[in-house]
């Protein structure tokens, strides 16, 4: 075996995992596809739904217009899985 070949073998370093600044999970750049990152493109808000419909189950003591939801999809659980997928975005990009 040529000494140079051994050197090249060493340079094939293991791919470094990156941290996604959007969903805060780690990923391997080679496995990053347009469906890898699940997120909500809008913020979790606390106000009336735009169409004034009540999707939010009111509890005792809530004002009649209370609504907390993601502006993008209307999901009312802050931990709801993202409604949109895209590539992960690293802090280096
Ligand atoms: Zn959403
Ligand atoms: Zn991500």
Image: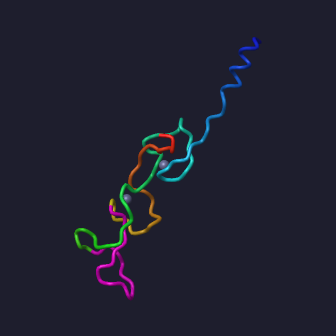
Q: Name the quadrant containing residue 18.
A: top right
**Going by the image, does 87 lie left or right of 51?**
right
Magenta-highlighted residues: 54-71
Q: How many marks?
A: 0
* Residue at x 53% of width, y 53% of height: 24
Locate residue 36, reporting x and y percent.
47, 45
Quarter that holds the N terminus: top right
Q: How is the image coloured?
A: rainbow
Magenta stretch: residue 15 in it?
no
Q: Is residue 18 above or below residue 51?
A: above
* Residue at x 44% of width, y 63% of height: 80
* Residue at x 74% of width, y 19% of height: 6
Seen from the viewer's position, the closer of residues 44 and 59 is 44
Of all residues, the one furthest to the bottom in this rendering is 61
Locate residue 44, reporting x and y percent.
39, 65
Kindly report the secondary structure that dominates the magenta region of the rendered protein.
loop
Locate residue 75, reporting x and y percent.
38, 65
Figure quarter occupied by ligand 1: bottom left
Q: Is residue 70 above or below residue 60?
A: above
Seen from the viewer's position, the closer of residues 33 and 88 is 88
Q: Name the quadrant containing residue 76.
A: bottom left
Q: Is residue 77 above or below residue 34?
A: below
Locate residue 15, reporting x and y percent.
62, 35
**Going by the image, does 64 lie left or right of 31?**
left
Of all residues, the one furthest to the front in this rendering is 92
Q: Is residue 57 above or below residue 17?
A: below
Of all residues, the one furthest to the top in this rendering is 2
* Residue at x 39% of width, y 52% of height: 84
């Amino acid at each position: 075996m040529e000494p140079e070949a051994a050197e090249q073998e060493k340079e094939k370093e293991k791919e470094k995992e990156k941290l996604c600044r959007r969903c805060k999970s780690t990923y391997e750049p080679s496995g990053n596809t347009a469906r890898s990152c699940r997120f909500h493109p809008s913020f979790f808000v606390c106000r009336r739904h735009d169409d004034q419909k009540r999707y939010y189950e009111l509890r005792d003591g809530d004002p009649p217009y209370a609504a907390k939801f993601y502006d993008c999809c209307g999901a009312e659980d802050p931990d709801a899985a993202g409604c949109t997928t895209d590539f992960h975005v690293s802090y280096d990009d």
